[in-house]
Amino acid sequence: MGTELIGRARAGDGEAFRALTEPHRRELQVHCYRMLGSFQDAEDALQDTLLSAWRGLGGFDGRASIRTWLYRIATNRCLSALRAAGRRPAKAWDIPGVEPPEPTRLGEAVWLEPFPDALLEGAFPVPPGPEARYEQRESVSLAFVTALQVLPPRQLAVLVLRDVLGFPAAEVAAMLDTTVDSVKSALKRARAGLRRQRQQREPAPAPGSPAERAIVADFVRAWETADIGALVALLTDDVFVSMPPLPLEYEGRDVAARFCAALFGAGRRFDLVPTRANGQPAFGAYLRGSAGIRHGTGLYVLTLAGDRISAMTRFENSVLPAFGLPRSVPG
């Protein structure tokens, strides 16, 4: 059947091409997202991958599987995007009437977007290879994707292909037009770089578990009532707050409390609409207005550790449509 589909696709049959590539579409999108850290950039890279595959199908020699061939194209499209000039720069603080506290530091990975959980369904159809080191849930977490963005592009690609997807070193070398020794060396450096970026934390509760639901309910209650004391009680001592593409980052309960107090200043109050991103609880935040309209101000993603919140990432309201959330809702 595969040979027949390839023959028909080479002859210009679009339906045959879709039948060949559709089973891999969602996992390729997630692969591009891991490499680029941006939902929109990943979608663009996926479209470029499929177009290149359609145009280059005549050069597919069958020595590798269609899946491996598509990953080769996608990986190299992402590497080109990472190396291109003009990657989106950091933004300046632009929330009127809110003065943020002095940040703990400025972030390195300032261009990052969340990935909707609704699109993760079907993204892991093939069990990872025996050499994969990361569980599927961990491999799409914000902490992992953020840490990846600090790695050099070639190391990033090798680590994802080897440690997340479990491709053998020889296949990765063929994908990247390099040697097995070069792949092994890049992987060693990438693992060391990732260890420096990531912190070991208590595991998060299972998605949808009573423990997760309890933390989420407490967070919503504290946020919607602007109860700083209750909110701080939910945070780990070293909680981390970030706001890509703003470079401001805050670490620790005290400064996180000051940041939240600034958001709630001047009587600003919010309603939260639940969703999920990167396998984590997330919320669209809507500012209550005097005219009966609540305006979406952004999306918050929570990282949980045990029964506490270890990180909170705020994204701009431009990401709301990807989660099926409106820019504004009636009051």
Image: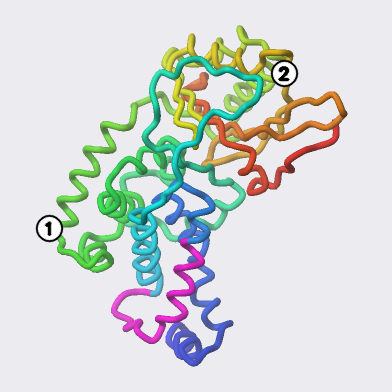
Q: List x then y, in percent, for residue 149.
A: 36, 43
Residue 94 is drawn in which quadrant? Answer: top right
Residue 199 numbered tag = none
Q: Is residue 50 magenta?
A: yes
Give the secondary structure at mark 1: helix
Q: List x then y, in percent, for residue 226.
A: 68, 14
| Magenta span | 45-65
Vertically, is 66 above or below 275? Answer: below
Q: Residues within 10 Å of mark 1 (few under 14, many from 20)?
A: few
Residue 181 numbered tag = 1
- Name the outermost residue toward the top: 229
| Residue pointed to by mark 2 | 268
Q: List x then y, in percent, for residue 59.
A: 34, 84
Residue 139 seen from this side:
yes
Q: As shown in the figure, which amino acid type bears the numbered disc 1?
A: Asp
User: Mark 1 touching mark 2, by CB under 8 A?
Assistant: no
Residue 131 seen from this side:
no
Give the camera-side residue of 215 and 80: 80
Q: List x then y, in percent, for residue 88.
A: 45, 46
Give the secondary structure at mark 2: loop
Q: As shown in the figure, which amino acid type bears the numbered disc 2?
A: Arg
273 on left or right of 139? right
Residue 31 is drawn in which quadrant? Answer: bottom left
Count the labels in the image: 2
Q: Earlier in the sequence, mark 1 or mark 2?
A: 1
Q: What's the CA distance linking mark 1 and mark 2?
A: 57 Å
